[in-house]
Image (cartoon, rainbow, N blue to C red):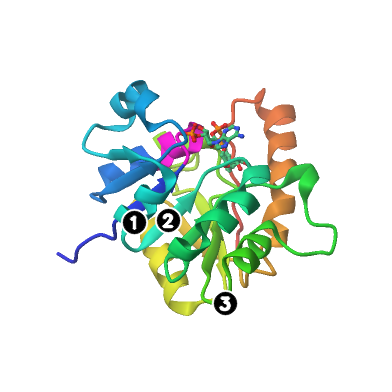
Amino acid sequence: MTRKPRIGILGTGTMALALGKSLLAAGHFVAFGSRRAESKNDFHEAVGTESRIYGYQAAIEDAGEIVIITLPYKEVAATARKLGDSLRNKIVIDITNPFTAQPNNGDSGAQVTASIIGDDALVIAAFKTNFAATFENPIDSTGEPREVHYAGDDEEAMKAVKQLIRGIGFKPVDCGTLAQAVVLDHMVPLMIRLDATELDAQHLSSFRITLG
Ligand SMILES: NC(=O)c1ccc[n+]([C@@H]2O[C@H](COP(=O)([O-])OP(=O)(O)OC[C@H]3O[C@@H](n4cnc5c(N)ncnc54)[C@H](OP(=O)(O)O)[C@@H]3O)[C@@H](O)[C@H]2O)c1
């Protein structure tokens, strides 16, 4: 069996817990980065104590190939600026949703992240359109795997993220380039609205694109 990529996850919130549990269950090593690693015992218990919790920098260094940013969008630019040197040449999965801070020049949030990390950035937008609560059950009410929409400019990085998505039980849907990921940014407020109006805000909805 081929070795699963080692993953770093920046942040220890709701999405870090959901993604972390799924990735650990799928056999990845996961290192979490936290502003206060020493106070995260409850998170460590909840996610799985075979993981590691460090500061952000150490988690990136221990990560190996792939780093997932699960911070509030407003924190991403400063964090990418501070840690840019370490993030270069890693695959960086940006799951963050800009909402009201959406760039007003038409760029996607993930493009901003990539421009800060620099020329060698391998940033992929993914998981933006997946509620944390759905990771417990990637199979939806129709019996099919839920979709994860992902987008990026580097072919190898896209392949690696596709495998990661499939490995945790979801259906990867290639949504184009990092510029095109702006569509994903805009799908999220729609998803939240529909989940609220149609499903009493249970956060168990997901998009399905039916082709043909
Ligand atoms: N919740 C969802 O269903 C969902 C779905 C798709 C995408 N997203 C996106 O994923 C990102 C994370 O969402 P989340 O729901 O996991 O958020 P969350 O529970 O608030 O977690 C965010 C984490 O970021 C870290 N952080 C760093 N600076 C922070 C600050 N100034 N304020 C608060 N936290 C800070 C914290 O970890 P440390 O204290 O350990 O540093 C915190 O646990 C967001 O950008 C969101 O839009 C969320």
Residue extending farthest left: 1
Nearest the camera: 22 or 79? Answer: 79
Element type where label 2 sits in the image: strand
Quadrant hosting ligand 1: top right
The residue drawn where x is 58% and y is 71% is 118
The spot of residue 59 in percent (x, y) is 36, 48
Q: Is residue 118 above or below residue 13?
A: below
**Labelled pair 3, 2 in contact (Cβ < 8 Å):** no
Mark 1: amino acid: Glu
Q: Amino acid at mark 3?
A: Asp
Q: How dense is the environment of label 3, judged by Cα within 10 Å: few (below 14), some, or many (20 and up)?
A: few
State how far apart marks 1 and 2 are (Cα). Answer: 10 Å
Q: Quadrant of the N terminus?
A: bottom left
Task: Read off the residue under disc 2.
Answer: 67
Residue drawn at (76%, 64%) of the image: 107
* Residue beneath the point at 30% across and 46% down: 30
Q: Is residue 212 visible to the viewer in this orientation of the structure?
A: no
Secondary structure category for the residue under label 3: loop
Q: Which mark is residue 61?
A: 1
Bounds of the magenta segment: 11-19
Image quadrant in which you'd find residue 192:
top right
Quarter-of-image position of residue 161: bottom left
Q: In the image shown, does 2 or 79 lie closer to the viewer?
A: 79
